[in-house]
Image: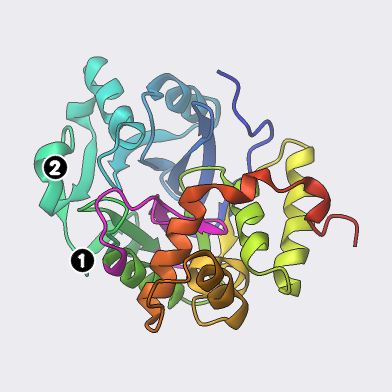
Amino acid sequence: MDHVVRTPTPPFATASGRLEVHQVPAWRDNLIWLLVDTATKEAAAIDGPPAADEVLAYCEARGLKLTAIFNTHTHHDHIGINQAFEQKGMLKDLRVVGAKKRADDVPGITEPVDDGDTLRFGDVNGKVMLTEGHIDGHVSYVFEDVVFCGDTLFAAGCGYLFDGPPAKMHESLKRLAALPPETRVCCAHEYTEDNLRFAWSVEPDNDALAERIRKVWALRAEGKCSVPSTIGEERASNPFLRFAQTTVQKAVADAFPDDDLSAPVDVFAATRRLKDRKDYRERPDHVLPLNE
């Protein structure tokens, strides 16, 4: 299966330099992240489909040793990596971190965690955030200036509300948006072009969004990855964080004229429902601000 990313994002250091973040594309659009202790070269995989061979090959080529898996949630393309290592007889030797409230569904879990817990890797303390809405028991991991947010916050989008309700996802997104603006957003999929198409359909007067579209289209034309973004970039151009903007409010009010959109959570819920309708995919490319 060809991945949509031909050239992964190069490894980058966290704020202290004690950790590095590596990207391993898997399946068609999944992004497996490796958190690496620069002193010991130990690595933790954050989520993944059944791609144990790809991760092991990546680690071997770079002198890394996989010692842990951090799961954000229990969909198959996120715990599949656990199952693949289990089939190899290797999972029992790994530290496996996952949500305490879904511990029974995380293969090989050794360390159940909950909102507010401290998660140590190498010499760095990370923070666990409960970020539900996409699915119950979804957690995100914050290490210094990087957040691994699974399928809650995407570059220019957010995950489907499989479990919901909208209020739960709305609260999770607000908490993530409150992280410092320089925080790198390491989500689990390369969905950015599609998300930006929708964003432009509801906020076509947003200059920051227009600039982001041009930047992402240029990257993706070369097969490069548009992830990570930053929290600051998401605040400026992600419609699911921009429920207070008049243009977004009008777009969803026009789409759902009979809905009560007086509360921010109602605007968010309507925005998610509008994206789920997929009307925006019928809009031609020439409406995008690609040549300005």
Residue situated furthest front in the rendering:
258
Is residue 133 highlighted in magenta? no
Relative image position of residue 30 (x, y in whole percent): 48, 36
Residue 135 drawn at (x, y percent)? 26, 50
Element at label 2: loop
145 relative to 67 in the view: left or right: right
Q: Number of marks in the image?
A: 2
Q: What is the x, y in percent for residue 174?
A: 39, 74
Q: Is residue 227 above or below residue 258?
A: above
Q: Are marks 1 and 2 in contact (CB under 8 Å)?
A: no
Q: Which of 203 and 27 is in front in this view?
A: 203
Distance from disc 1 to disc 2, alpha carbons, whole Å, reads: 17 Å
- The residue that mark 1 highlights is 115
What stretch of residues is rendered in magenta?
143-167
Q: Which residue is drawn at 54% across and 47% down?
A: 278
Residue annotated with mark 2: 110
Quadrant of image for the C terminus: bottom right
Q: In which quarter of the image is the N terminus?
A: top right
* Disc marking residue 184: none
**Colour convention of the picture:** rainbow
Residue kind at label 1, given as amino acid type = Asp
Residue 146: say if magenta.
Answer: yes
Q: Please state the horizontal and vertical placement of residue 214, each as a whole percent of the image.
A: 79, 56
Residue 183 seen by the camera: no
In screen coordinates, is 96 left or right of 177? left
Question: What residue is shown at x 44% (from left), y 42% (from top)?
Answer: 41
